[in-house]
Amino acid sequence: MTPPAPDAAAYLPGGHQLPAGEPQPAPVAPGQEYGPGPVPAPGHGYAPGPVPAPAGAEFGPNKKQPTGAIIGIIAGGVVVLLVLAAAVIVPLLGGGSSSAGGDKDEAAPAAATPEEWVEAYLTAVSEGDAEEAVKYIDTSSYSAALLTDEVLEASLKLGPIDDIKVGEAEEGDYSDVTVTATFTIGGKEVSREFQMYQSSYDGDITMLDGAARVSTYGFDDVGLTVNGVEVPDDALVFPGTYEFGTSLEEFTVEGESTLVVADEKSEEAVSMLRPALSDSGIATYRELVTTSLRECLAMKTLNTPCGMDVTGMEKDGYAVVDGTVTRVMNAEGEAALAGLVGEVSDRAVVSTYESFGIDISVEAQNAEGQRGTYTTYYSGLLTPKVDFAVETPKVVWE
């Protein structure tokens, strides 16, 4: 076919116009479409004329576009389509790779089904391999300070993990998957569900709740320890057995301090833990209060740091004379002081609601200078509080 005259306007599909004087492409047959770029002439491959390049391309109207580049572009488009098509048909419960919350710099676990994922995770935990186990779980919500070989080794000594059995995965409505597993911790059977997500795009698996949470509520300033390691914030632990304590020797954990932590129910048990005074703390608190109170009892002033204030006390026109006050603890008060225990009132502060019987006698004088002796059984003793979080604990009476 004879090309159009040089001055005829020629356009490629999409509105691209060839420069005047350049050889023009053959007409497009009805129903035939071509994208941007050279259009093949019937029976002759690509037309010889150059085609305007898109903005920013290395070749322009006066530069020949390599045939290989055109073929590469077309082939690349096919590859993209194939990749997208493959992504769509990945089955939910098929193989996948890791998107767990462990160290992102470490190699992800090998592709696995959700069932294999759970089994590999529990196996790594049972073998004491924290570095491997952490790759399977999401650690983004809480501290990972307890997900170490040291803590896990202590856990397995308290209660080995055995008899791992993993059930079939159940698919949810939103690419979520539930896998039920049973295993023993120290001979006690545990059955729990693992909630997982597997991407339908690339098959990546995320275990949403593989670890259990340890709450530090109520242990501010006291310092909660788990298998000997202090945790300042809520932290994750692998399923296992853990011994809870405190970082201050004056405190311990109230009630049972060694617990199996593996699921939501055991997480609740941990959240109910509270600090209490240890034997050392009880002895120290009692000693500090006894010393401070006896110093106050020895004072003759109207008021003391411990309270027992008689300022303004008056009877029948007689007012108390400063420096004449005598305060003596009675037998009941001495017994209460000797058995003083104290309790945690706030953070690392210990106080008591115990009352101490104290007899107070004073000399009083009227306007004429006459004196008399009076006795009162009202002591007005303040509450002794000790903050064990400070460097040097002492009694503050409030």
Image (cartoon, helix red, strand yellow):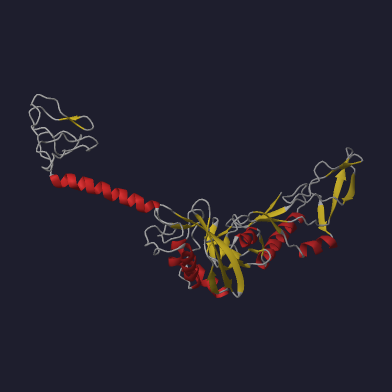
Report the front residue among 195 and 173: 173
Looking at the image, residue 386 sits to the left or right of residue 79; the answer is right
Q: Position of residue 52 (x, y in %)?
A: 16, 34
Q: Residue furthest top?
A: 7
| Residue found at x 65% / y 64% | 253
- The quadrant of the image that shows the N terminus is top left
Q: Is residue 360 above or below residue 70?
A: below
Q: Position of residue 43 (x, y in %)?
A: 12, 42
Q: Position of residue 363 (x, y in %)?
A: 86, 48
Q: Is residue 231 something that shows in the picture? A: no
Looking at the image, residue 379 sits to the left or right of residue 177; the answer is right
Looking at the image, residue 358 sits to the left or right of residue 69; the answer is right
Q: Is residue 127 above or below residue 102?
A: below
Q: Quadrant of residue 320?
A: top right
Q: How many marks?
A: 0
Q: Is residue 114 something that shows in the picture? A: yes
Report the front residue among 74 and 292: 74
| Residue found at x 50% / y 72% | 126
Q: Position of residue 299 (x, y in %)?
A: 75, 53
Looking at the image, residue 194 sits to the left or right of residue 89; the answer is right
Q: Quadrant of residue 369?
A: top right
